[in-house]
Image (tube, rainbow, N blue to C red):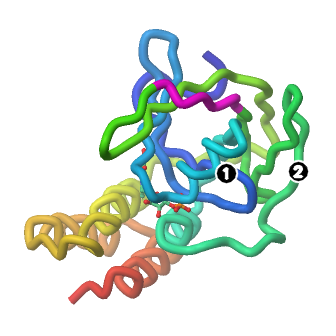
Amino acid sequence: MGLLNDGINEVIVTTHHNAAPIGIISRNEKLRMTLYHGSHTAEQVISGGWVVANFLFDPVIYVTTAFDDLPAAAFMEETAGNFTVERLCSCEAWGAYQATVERTTRESLLVSLLPLREEKEDLLLHPVNRGFNSIIDATVHGTRYKVTRDPELRDLIGYHAGIVKKCGGPREKEALALLFDYIDYP
Ligand SMILES: Cc1cc2nc3c(=O)[nH]c(=O)nc-3n(C[C@H](O)[C@H](O)[C@H](O)COP(=O)(O)O)c2cc1C
């Protein structure tokens, strides 16, 4: 099934001049995403019909793209099928997919993905690091905490922050400080 594994792949999805962490769901040999209304990614899927899954392991990029934009210089063009797509220059591998809205609900779009082209660039080894994984979890909770200020989410973020402090390297700690800034964490 190419670069994506069965289950949910938490990748950085790029569309035209936009990047965001998104979960690509691979189940029963089908690739899908659920996109909440209002995100740039959802708008761009409707207008452009393609996405790129960027595989990279920089926790700062996960936090930044969850809350902010990357500069235009972070993106480069590639050809995939009949589309000119954009990927991140710094990714280790990427896959371009045709993206079709399968269903729309009040909250979200269900988008199905068809592989167009997948490439490996400079692959590095990434030993499992709980600090990195906890940045991903804390950022997921952080995107909702920023809106709801739910104390349960605040506690979950606090739990993951503890793991980042214990197990993370300097880049994970930088990402945590950035996350706290974005979500105004107490
Ligand atoms: C690891 C991770 C996975 C996420 N997965 C999704 C997802 O599957 N669908 C979604 O709509 N938002 C998801 N989000 C939240 C979006 O990244 C967030 O709303 C972001 O601001 C959207 O950016 P955009 O407006 O540039 O598209 C996820 C966030 C993180 C940190």
x%, y% of residue 149?
17, 76
x%, y% of residue 115?
70, 23
- Residue 20 seen by the camera: yes
CA separation, marks 1 and 2? Answer: 11 Å
> At 80% from the left edge and 33% from the top edge, which residue is drawn?
119
Q: Quadrant of ligand 1?
A: bottom left
Vertical placement of 176 versus 138: above or below?
below
Vertical placement of 95 versus 86: above or below?
above
Q: Quadrant of residue 96?
A: top right
x%, y% of residue 53?
64, 41
> At 58% from the left edge and 66% from the top edge, which residue is drawn?
61
Q: Is residue 49 magenta?
A: no
Badge 2, how many Cα within 10 Å: few under 14, some, many 20+? few
Amino acid type for the residue under numbered disc 1: Thr
For the residue pair 172 and 114, the one nearer the viewer reads as 114
**Mark 1: which secondary structure?**
strand
> At 27% from the left edge and 64% from the top edge, which residue is drawn?
144
| The C terminus - image quarter | bottom left
Magenta extent: 97-102
Which label's residue is closer to the chain start, 1 or 2? 1
Amino acid type for the residue under numbered disc 2: Glu
For the residue pair 38 and 177, the one nearer the viewer reads as 38
Q: Which residue is mark 2?
A: 77
Numbered circle sitting on residue 14: 1
Left or right: 85, with 7 as reference point? right
Left or right: 34, with 56 as reference point? left
Q: Residue furthest left?
A: 151
| The N terminus - image quarter | top right
